Amino acid sequence: MILLRNGTYIDWKTLEFTTTDLLVEEGTNARILFVDPSSSQKADIIIDCSGQIITHAFANGHHHAYSALSRGMPPPQKTPGNFREILQYVWWTLDKALDPESIRFSALVTAIACAKNGTTFVIDHHASPFAIDGCLDVIAEAFDTVGVNHLLCYEISDRDGETIASKGIAETARYLEHRQGLVGLHASFTVGDQTLQKSIELSARHNAGIHIHVAEDTYDQQHCLETYHSRIIPRLNKAGALQFPKTILAHCLHLEQEERKLLSETPVWIAENMESNLNNAVGFFNGEHLFNRVMLGTDGMHSDMIRSAQAAYFAGHLHDAIDYPGTYRRFRNIHRYLDQNGFTGDSDNNLVVLDYASPTPFTRDNFAGHFLFGWESKQITHVISDGRLIVEKGRCTRVDEENILSEACKAAERMWTRMQ
């Protein structure tokens, strides 16, 4: 057990502040207990949190660990002129170059970055069309090694042909036999009716959900109208993809009012990825009429959820129905998604400790102002996942960071060579 002494605990649901000692039990569904500071409580690890904030750890609603080795890579052979070409010449070139080694290091460095940024749960969306067999276990084992919990899927797509699409379905089915996960699909414009139907049947068989990119760019809607004579949301709804409360629709930028109304009548969740949308110049998210089931992701851009929340507000408040409380609600909605759907790995004993020295009064009433304008991931000192200390004084405790980063650089160079 871990004892956090003299910290100020902020309940993530009520924002109630409590100065206390906190006893953290270890385990997947274990508890945290308030302890009288005057008691002589014993624990395996004791951490002095005087002057520091303790609160529930963070979670990422849409990540792409497979992109982790892209930073600084050589430019594509052709400069992309639109979003479709960004996928074709950058990301679909990269994912074809992935092998088990680069998948493993991509997952390790992503898990390290998540842990150090206070994120103990990641919903990830993976693609490696020439290295599909066993890829999800490689990622899961890497995340487990660092101590970050996860909900994984493979990005099933017809863009590389029927054989590879079938392999994606088979890998998903194999993984769901022994791990919690989702059924991943790329996007409507690369998923034909047959593959879509097989994926929905697989999801129903395993009581899972679909995880798919939706209307990230106008091309997705255009293709759907030209090919299926329907917009994306009606197409997915007719096929049965929106029946699952575990289903996640990433992006959802280019939706008409009728699609928003239809979504409001389903149990699905939406993952907003503001910075990725800005980077790709595809538009701005607007949560108007999209109910209270919007959570935040990073789409592989980075692993800092505080930054993601702040970007959602700063870039969104001129284009979106978002305010201070609404931003924090989206930041925390992923916990509601995980809890309501019975996923494990996000219990109360997942905690983050921040050394936040505020120059102004910090209370329950003005929490959102501090969260948006004061909190930074560099303030994170300790991170606890399932009651285990995975980050201590800003350093990962379960892995050798320097060695992993060194080996990841070598794996990246080999992957970049294959991309040429």
Image (tube, grey):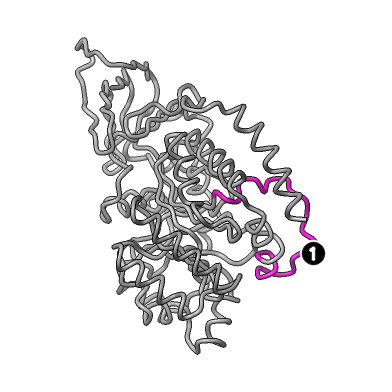
Mark 1 is surrounded, within 10 Å at the Cα level, by few (under 14), some (14 to 19) or many (20 or more) other residues, namely: few
Count the marks: 1
**Residue 380 x, y percent position in the rendering:** 47, 30
Q: Quadrant of the C terminus?
A: bottom right
Is residue 293 shown left or right of residue 108?
left
Q: Quadrant of residue 106?
A: top right
Provide the residue designation for mark 1: 78
Question: At 66% across and 70% down in the image, what residue appears?
Answer: 84
Question: Within the image, what quadrant is residue 275 found in?
Answer: bottom right
SS of the residue at dot 1?
A: loop
What is the quadrant of residue 358 in the picture? top left
The residue under label 1 is which amino acid type?
Lys
Residue extent of the magenta highlight: 65-87
Judge whether residue 75 is colored magenta. Answer: yes
**Residue 357 appears in the rendering:** no
Left or right, 273 with reference to 24: right
